Amino acid sequence: MRLSQRIKVLALLTIAASAALLLDSAAAPATNEQSAGDYIVDHRHSPHAQLRPVPFDAVQWTDGFWADRFKQVCDVTLDESWRLLADPAAGHVLDNFRFAAKPGTGNYLGTTWQDEWLYKWIEAAACVWRVNHDPEVERRMNEGIALIAAAQQPDGYLSTMPLVKGQSRFQDPKDHEIYNMGHLLTAGIIHYRMTGNDALLNIAKRTGDFLCANLGVTVKPYFAHNPSAIMGLVELYRLTGEKKYLQCAQLIVDRRGENPKKRSREEYQTGMDGTDVIQDRVPVRKSSEIVGHNVFFTYLYTGAGDLVAESGEGELESALGRLWTDMTQRKMFIHGGVSAIPSGVSASKDFVNEAAGAPYQLPNASCYNETCGQIGAFMWGYRMLVDHPDGQFADIMEREMFNGFIPCIGLEGKSWFYRNVIRRYDENYQAKGGTDMAERQLPGRKQICCPSNLLRTLAELSAYFYSLDEDGLWVHHYGGNKLNCQLLSGDSFALEEVTDYPWSGEVKFVIHQAPPKAVSLRLRVPGWADKAAFAINGKPVREAKSQHGYFTLAQTWKTGDTITLSLPMESKLVAADPRVEETRNQVAVMRGPVLYCVESPDLPPGVDVPSVLLPSTTTFKPVVGMAGVESPLAGKTVLLRGPALHRAEPRMPPLYRPLSQESFQPFDLTLIPYYAWANRGHSAMSVWLPVVLKN
């Protein structure tokens, strides 16, 4: 038997074994009526998830950083996104659905994945509606759902580009048909959970049935190369209890890497199957490093994490652990970016784009770091966290929250970046086209995946702050909110979190309701915090137990009890592993979870970004308020000020010259949060700055 034949046989055996494992060990959820609830990721009944979610309704923002962001989503971003997607001269999304319902009545415009803009908008809108019950938001959701229903084909298929253009289905994976349908699944589930209306859910079920009937039969599994469908299918299983959805999701994971190939850049244009760009060279269970497109691998492993929560399969679980370590310890940027190269060649000689690079290949100015990749890392981190409760996963989620994906959106809530570079020396930089941008833009007929993805993520963010287990409550993240939930014991529990985090390290919890028995509160101490102090009703706690990044406070709580967590908020100079060549002898500045940068509008005359250096002894003081930006968020932003150095050097040929003997000149430097850069027009910026060592 040839090696290729043996590989195919082994792949089929693995698929069969995986299906059997799911049938035997995955406990089906309760009935549909019992499963319905306002959950974003509903792993309440997942037998191998160690933590349980709280309902979306259980957490209400009060004030502070994330409350302000959610308010902006409600007041500005959600409306702006609808305006653009509905506009034939901008997003053209609604017209695409109209023309798909009646082929021949109009032309398709936009990317092949333009459908997902409407799906993600509905997902975000359903969460906003759940909070404010805005009738206009409801009207728009219903309008969108009616168009989706009209465009869906009798067998459940729906992707507007082939329908409008009259093309045959599944001719090219880059048409993103299954990617679009995957986001339809998720939108239908979230809309149903938030509104109780099953109109979109029924559409999603028909699409799920179509995928179950065709994927791996008439449609090659690699057409799910951008595998949003895994998460949608698993969540559909969790809602309905129908195991065919779980098995279809498993099929996508099982079939990766079954037929490795090599393709040049030119050949890549005709297919991606079998290559590193979609993580299809090595089976997932045998993989040890992340390769290829940042969204493809983060979505694949997020979905695989959902599967592990259902099956508990050890081999897949071990692979995810190896891959997570590779991403976070060798291939992740300081702001959470996971995509080093716009285009290039992998170690296996495959052409890859928007991809992870080699170990420690983390360039500052040329990095790609698509926002969707950072959101994918955040979602993957959550699956790792609930399957293996450990603060390291929540730490990465927090890194993404403050530095990885909110830099995508302008402080005014409308403009956006697709990529997230961490250095730009030329303040008059000119975009090179494609996804390269000189400054933030409004979403339009291209590059829409990141703005729509960020919209739904911000709308749903409160769902990731708390978890439950048999002993009580886990607190993963901090921000002003009220929690009112039912513990797994069935007892009611309510508290309020009062904090100005991340600007302040003081976090106070006020108990509003608790049962007359001991309840454990597990509070995460972030990895960046050198120390933490706890107090109960003002009395310091000396013997709090720490395990895996969480401190446990267990006792019988009374109404009015207060718990205070105090975290140090001094600024820190941070260095990279010396194997990261692009940051040798440089430092970045962090204060708490927030990454800072220097931006040209804050520099005095005669000083440019490349000339700025930091003494190794520099300390910064916080200053509130960012001038020159018309946004309520700017007035609350904490900047840093402290001593720095600059050295004048010629900006002219020759390229190489004798070492400058110019002395360093001191000046007062202002740093802004990295997420806030590029809100004042064209500018130069850098996260990493050369360091001058001082004893």
Image (cartoon, rainbow, N blue to C red):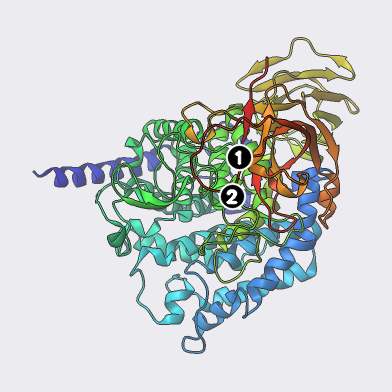
The three-letter amino acid code for the residue at tag 1 is His
The answer to whether the residues at label 2 and label 1 have Cβ atoms under 8 Å apart is yes
How crowded is the residue under tag 2: few (<14 C-alpha within 10 Å), some, or many (20+)? many
**Residue 522 position (above or below residue 305):** above
Checking the image for residue 672, the label placed there is none
> Nearest the camera: 356 or 3?
356
Rendering coords of residue 199 (x, y %): 61, 68
Q: Position of residue 296 (x, y in %)?
A: 44, 51
What is the number of callouts on the image? 2
Residue 68: percent from left, percent from top: 81, 49
Q: Earlier in the sequence, mark 2 or mark 1?
A: 1
Q: Which mark is residue 335?
A: 1
The answer to which image quadrant residue 196 occupies is bottom right
| Secondary structure type for disc 1 | loop
Q: Amino acid at mark 2?
A: Asn
Q: Residue at x 50, y 86 (%)?
A: 102
Picture coordinates of residue 675, whole percent (x, y): 69, 46
Frontmost residue, 30 versus 363: 363
Q: Which residue is mark 2?
A: 420
In front here: 642 or 538? 642
Q: Is residue 240 above or below residue 157?
A: above
Q: Which quadrant is the C terminus positioned in?
A: top right
How many residues crowd mark 1 within 10 Å: few (<14), some (14–19), many (20+)? many
Outermost residue to the left: 1
Instruction: Tell me which residue sits at (86%, 30%) in the image.
Output: 510
